[in-house]
Image (tube, helix red, strand yellow):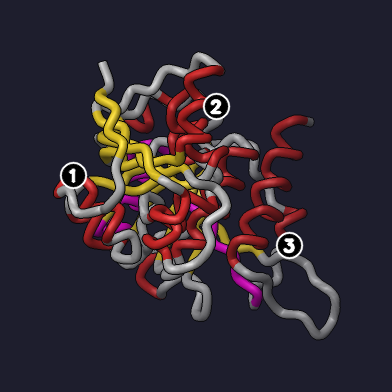
Amino acid sequence: MALIHRITSLDLSELQPYRTLRRPAEHYEQGIFVAEGEKVVRRLLASGLPTISMLLTEEWFATLTQSKITLTAPDIFVAEKSLLEAIVGFRMHQGIMAVVRVPPEPSLDQLVDSSPSPRLFVALDGLVFAENVGVVVRNCAAFGVQGILVGGTSASPYLRRAVRNSMGTVFRMPVLHCPALFETLMRLHTEYGMSILVTDAHTQTSLYHLDCVDNLCIVFGNEDSGVSDEVRGAATHAARIPMAEGVDSLNVASASAVVLAEVARQRLE
């Protein structure tokens, strides 16, 4: 049963993750992340992920308890909104946060075995902005991706801003961090027969002329330089998104939506 703590300061040791909200990389190293905002926290509570604590206003506490939502965190801290706003240094409209344990990851074998054919995975190679990672995760959830492989040079989907921009869809998306992404992609191809697709503005093959209905892993690369040369070496296919003359690229989050929507379209036909 949750313990309710009404607080007037953030000095308690249990509140340390909230005080260090702007250091999400440290949180991830500790095996935790912070979820913030109404929709994200509601989806968190519905997901069943182990929640360590919650910090919220009296108004939000009343709203959640009156709606009979089960608050699974062992410790719930209730404070004035001004105290929560002091954490981030500006007016915060949401007034609700939670500290969560990063869920255990599946092995590659488990991820493949649990994903029915035709399988669809996404790999992230060198994405450095957590906001982009979060939007890519949200797009993956929208278009039926069964798992996300995160290369060693990419930001984690469990960084605070990534979680926020995913709108909590990361809570139901299997995530596997792969320090050696090239080797992981080669295994997917050689052991499991999956095609590996990279987007490339310089190739002649249009995305719309590529057959994407079989087992497929799509690689999205760095915001500036795209997919690395090493990871590109694991690709079985490369395709470009056709664009108007004078425009050669999209933001990676936008590009992921275009590519995944086309794959979903083909698989629905």
Picture coordinates of residue 153 (x, y %)?
32, 67
100 in relation to 88, above or below: above
Left or right: 228 in relation to 75: right
29 or 200: nearer the eye?
A: 29
Locate the C terminus by quadrant. top right
Q: How many marks?
A: 3
The segment highlighted magenta reads 179-201
Determine contact: label 1, label 2, CB under 8 Å: no
Say the numbered circle drawn on residue 37: none
**Comes first in the chain, label 2 or label 3:** 2
Determine contact: label 2, label 3, CB under 8 Å: no
> Residue under circle 2?
63
Per the model, the C-alpha gap separating discs 1 and 2 is 24 Å
Does the magenta portion include 59? no
Picture coordinates of residue 212 (x, y %)?
64, 44
Per the model, the C-alpha gap separating discs 3 and 1 is 53 Å
> Residue under circle 3?
206
Mark toward the viewer: 2 or 3: 2
**Comes first in the chain, label 3 or label 1:** 1
Determine contact: label 3, label 1, CB under 8 Å: no
What amino acid is found at the position of numbered circle 1 in the picture? Answer: Glu
Rate crowding at label 3 as few (under 14), some (14 to 19) or many (20 or more) other CA atoms within 10 Å: some
In terms of image quadrants, where is residue 206? Answer: bottom right
186 in relation to 120, above or below: below
